[in-house]
Amino acid sequence: MLCSNLRPALPHLLWRRLAGTATSRTAAVKRPEILSVSLAFEDPSAFRVKSLGELLRALGVFRLCSFPVLVNNCGKLMTAARTILGRRGFSLLLRPTVYAQFVAGENETEIAQSMGKISLLGLRPMLAVPIEEDLGESTGKPAVH
C-alpha cells in the first residue's frame, strides 16, 4: 500500500532532484516528461558505440561476476593471483579485463572519450570519482607503495 502511494510522486521527486543539482543542467532539463522515457535493453542500437571486443569483455566479466564463489572470495583470489603472477602479470591480466570494464579511463583524455561514447547514445554520463585514503593519512606514518 505504501509503495503504491509513493510511485506517483517518484517522477516529481526525481524532477526536483535534477532541477536543483546544478545550474548548468537546469537549462537543459526543462520538463518532467524527459524523465518518463522508457529504456529498452532489447534495442540493439544501444550497442552501436561498442566494439566486438568490448562486448565480449562485458559478457565475460558479467559471467564471472555471476558466480557467488568468485564474488565472495575476490579479495583472496586477487591476492593469490598477484602472488602467483607478480604485480606486472597481475596488471597485464586484470587491467584490460575487469578494470577496463568498470573504469572509464586512467586520465582525462580516456575519460572524455568514454563519456563521449555514452553521450552518443543520448545518455548523460555520471562520473563517480572514488575517494581513496592514503594509508599514511590515517596513521600519521608515510605510506609504503
Image: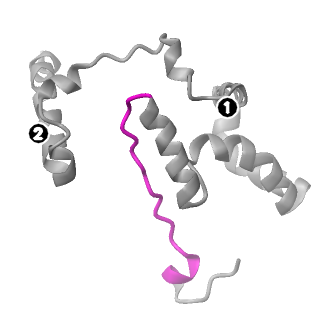
Q: Please rate how many residues cluster around mark 1, counting C-alpha atoms within 10 Å: few if below 14, some from 14 to 19, many from 20.
A: some
Element type at mark 1:
helix
- Residue under the point 12% across and 15% down: 1
- Residue under the point 46% across and 63% down: 131
Residue 4 visible to the viewer: yes
Element type at mark 2:
helix
- Residue 51, image x and y in percent? 67, 28
Residue underneath mark 1 = 54
- Residue under the point 21% across and 20% down: 36
The residue furthest right is: 84
The magenta stretch is: 121-138
- Residue under the point 78% across and 55% down: 91
- Quadrant, the C terminus: bottom right
- Residue 143, image x and y in percent? 63, 82
| Vertical comparison of 118 with 141: above or below | above
Identify which amino acid the numbered label 2 is placed on: Arg
* Circle number at residue 16: 2
| Vertical comparison of 79 with 113: above or below | below
The reply to whether callout 1 and callout 2 are in contact (CB within 8 Å) is no
For this view, does 105 lie left or right of residue 126? right
